[in-house]
Image: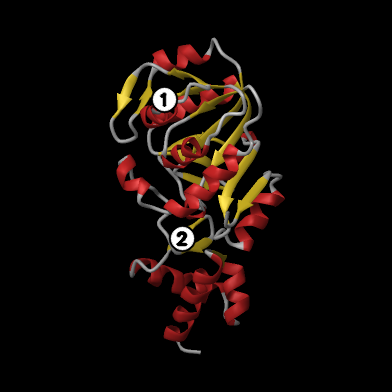
């Protein structure tokens, strides 16, 4: 097998399963681990893959900050499916916290309160969506507005959360990874979400499958701190197995 043939097979393998270890590729291509490492180094130089923790992946694991309008255009159908499923978890006369992001905005768009609902949120978009519903008591957290996410951050919002207790926190993330946990691109927002986790009995993460294996600048928590992760059916079987082996309550949604 030529080097070019090995490189093509490596890329094809990553397209099928998102990531692969040196050992897996060595066994698959029937060459030494040294040869695989050289191949991966060359492919990384050519910007055809990235290496992380001994694995090869197709996407850059490090996320740059995007505006909420940019994020809204990405995986919009998957986010709506995730939001629809998350909304079904809200119970009669529930009290919930909703963080910021486009996945939780999809949740807000799918909420139909059962009798009455109390919502605490940092997101101006979520507040705008739910504030017109007379069955919802809406509490908007104060603080400094973060322009890219149209959400509040800072000590004022964190202090408000110390005075409340809710059944569920619904939160979006910029990345979730078995090794790194859940993360976003802003340390102030990560601080606020940790306070939200303390104020809620259950933490539910809404994240489309493109976020798997990605990392934001600010780590929020490990996956051990997450009670449920809702994602879409494009998540690979290998990724799903890795998460389930960690004990993550994984909910994969398909079509409505």
Q: Residue at x 38, y 23 (%)?
A: 153
Q: Position of residue 112 (x, y in %)?
A: 55, 33
Of all residues, the one furthest to the top in this rendering is 163
What residue lies at 58% left-to-right and 58% top-to-bottom? 233
Whether residue 167 sits left or right of residue 147 in the image: it is right
Around disc 2, counting alpha carbons within 10 Å, would you say few (fewer than 14), some (14 to 19), or many (20 or more)?
many
Number of numbered discs on residues = 2
Task: From the viewer's perspective, tell me whether residue 97 is left or right of residue 88.
Answer: left
Spatial CA span between label 1 and label 2 = 47 Å
Q: Position of residue 67 (x, y in %)?
A: 30, 41
Quick check: can you spot residue 50? yes
Q: Earlier in the sequence, mark 1 or mark 2?
A: 2
Is disc 1 in contact with disc 2, using a CB cutoff of under 8 Å?
Answer: no
- Judge by depth and name the residue closer to the eye, 189 or 109: 109
Q: Please provide percent x and percent y for residue 151.
A: 36, 28
| Colour treatment of the image | secondary structure
Seen in the picture, residue 46 relative to 216 is either above or below; the reply is below
Residue in the image at 53% along x and 63% along y: 19
Question: Which dot, 1 or 2, sits closer to the camera?
Answer: 1
Residue behind mark 2: 51
80, 248: nearer the viewer: 80
Q: Secondary structure at mark 2?
A: strand
Identify the residue at image location x=41%, y=65%.
49
- The x and y percentages for residue 148 are 30, 35
Q: Residue 189 bears which disc, if any?
A: none
Furthest residue in direction bottom, as rendered? 1
CA neighbours of label 1 inside 10 A, class few (<14), some (14 to 19), many (20+): few
Q: Tell me if 203 is positioned left or right of 138 in this view.
A: right
Which sits in the foreground, 208 or 6?
208
Q: Which residue is mark 1?
A: 132
Question: Which element is circle 1 on?
Answer: loop
Quadrant hosting residue 249: top right
């Amino acid at each position: 097998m030529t080097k070019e043939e090995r490189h093509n097979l490596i890329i094809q393998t990553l397209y099928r399963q998102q990531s692969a270890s040196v050992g897996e590729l060595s066994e698959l291509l029937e060459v030494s681990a040294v040869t695989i490492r050289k191949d991966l180094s060359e492919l990384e130089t050519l910007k055809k893959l990235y290496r992380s923790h001994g694995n090869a992946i197709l996407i850059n694991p490090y996320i740059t900050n995007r505006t909420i309008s940019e994020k809204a255009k990405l995986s919009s159908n998957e986010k709506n499916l995730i939001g629809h499923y998350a909304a079904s978890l809200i119970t009669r006369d529930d009290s919930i916290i909703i963080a910021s992001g486009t996945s939780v905005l999809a949740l807000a768009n799918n909420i139909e309160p059962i009798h009455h609902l109390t919502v605490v949120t940092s997101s101006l978009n979520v507040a705008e969506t739910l504030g017109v519903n007379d069955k919802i008591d809406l509490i908007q957290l104060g603080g400094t507005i973060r322009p890219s996410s149209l959400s509040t951050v800072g000590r004022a919002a964190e202090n408000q959360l110390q005075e409340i207790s809710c059944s569920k926190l619904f939160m979006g993330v910029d990345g979730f990874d078995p090794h790194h946990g859940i993360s976003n691109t802003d340390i102030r927002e990560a601080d606020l979400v940790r306070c939200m986790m303390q104020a809620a009995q259950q933490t539910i993460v809404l994240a489309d499958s493109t976020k798997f294996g990605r990392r934001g600048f600010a780590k929020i928590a490990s996956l051990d701190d997450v009670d449920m992760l809702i994602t879409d059916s494009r998540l690979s079987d290998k990724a799903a197995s890795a998460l389930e082996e960690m004990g993550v309550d994984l909910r994969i949604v398909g079509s409505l």
